[in-house]
Image (cartoon, grey):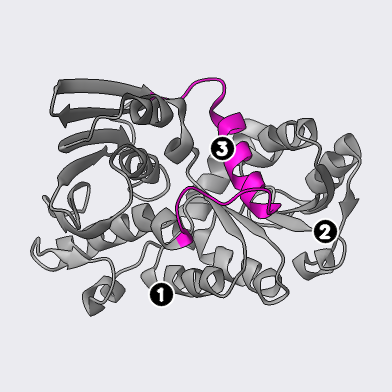
Amino acid sequence: MRIGVVDLDTSHPAAFLPLLRQRGHEVVAVYGGQTVVDDDYTRGYAAEHGLQVVADPEDLLGVVDAVFIHSVDWDNHLVRARPFAEAGVPIHICKPFAGRAADLREMIRWADSGVRLSGGSALRWSAAVSDWQATGNEVLTAYGATYGHPLDYGIHAYALLSGLLGPGVEAARSLDDEGRRVELRWRDGRTAVVAVAPPGTGGYGFFATLVHPEGVHHVEAGGSDLYGRFIDVTVGHLSGEREQPVSFAELVEPELSVIAGLASAEHGGSWIALHGDARIDDVAFDGKEFAASYRVTRRKALGLS
């Protein structure tokens, strides 16, 4: 496939590019955006990798066979993706897919209409998940944790548990006043707890403790092959070579769970259903607010003024 990149906000565009080319795909064009980087950085990135620079994301239409959207402001994801969805161009959207349930519902409608959508957290497809699945054991209940922003970084813990327990989350409830400790309930009655410690209090990665019929099992996710495994799943789906192991509606259950947890915190710890519960629309995570703080740290890491 010919692949276009939209927004050079995160480390993923640089990390994914060689993995895509190793798999026979070609990254051909880029729109750098202004959220984090400037035009000089975009031109330098394009020159380094031999890419065409476009002035607007929609200029990629007709030039690429698929697009990777790397906006750190998740409120931009729906706007960035819509022209490509309407044109039937396959789309990879960086984690988290969105910060409000209405945006996720629109993406689900796109997928249901035949648009190939993928992305999210790489933890969903990590070796920790596949190794556990190979045991054939069923998780009865689990506890997973990480630290940082509840949606931006916390999404990894939710995605890890979704991979380990499988799809089918129906509701969430907050166990605190902030939505940082959230209990998830699956349709078959199983439950799990996710804890996302505030920034600066962690430093650990992504782990989960699983209770299963044979005992207790502890997993830690990550590893040098994390992005490679992720690209194999997402690009395989975008190219039409293979279907994703889960539907897109199931793929966004982690994001819906985080949002439902926040809504539950606003409603006294009540269970909030991921679908069909109007209270999930009472809240949203502010992508622009997060992007403003992220911009400062990211530009410092890139050596930009």
Which three-letter amino acid code belongs to the residue tagged 3? Phe
Which three-letter amino acid code belongs to the residue tagged 2? Val
Residue 228 shown in magenta: yes
- Label 3 and label 1: CA atoms lie apart by 26 Å
Specify whether 132 is left or right of 52.
Answer: left
Task: Return the disc, 1 or 2, that comes first in the chain's sequence.
Answer: 2
- Badge 2 marks a residue whose secondary structure is loop
Q: Residue at x 86, y 43 (%)?
A: 46
Tell me if residue 194 can be seen. yes
Specify whether 76 is left or right of 271.
Answer: right
Please give the label number shown on residue 230.
3
CB-based contact (under 8 Å), mark 3 and mark 1 = no
Q: Which residues are magenta?
A: 221-248
Mark 1 against mark 2, which lies toward the viewer? 2
Q: Residue at x 65, y 71 (%)?
A: 85
Above or below for 9 versus 6: above
- Badge 1 marks a residue whose secondary structure is helix
Q: Which residue is mark 2?
A: 64
Which three-letter amino acid code belongs to the residue tagged 1? Ala
Q: Position of residue 20 (x, y in %)?
A: 74, 37
Q: Residues within 10 Å of mark 3 (few under 14, many from 20)?
A: many
Task: Return the disc, 2 or 3, that comes first in the chain's sequence.
Answer: 2
Please give the label number shown on residue 285.
none
Task: Return the disc, 3 or 1, that comes first in the chain's sequence.
Answer: 1
Q: Position of residue 9 (x, y in %)?
A: 63, 48
Please give the label number shown on residue 102.
1
Mark 3 against mark 1, which lies toward the viewer? 3
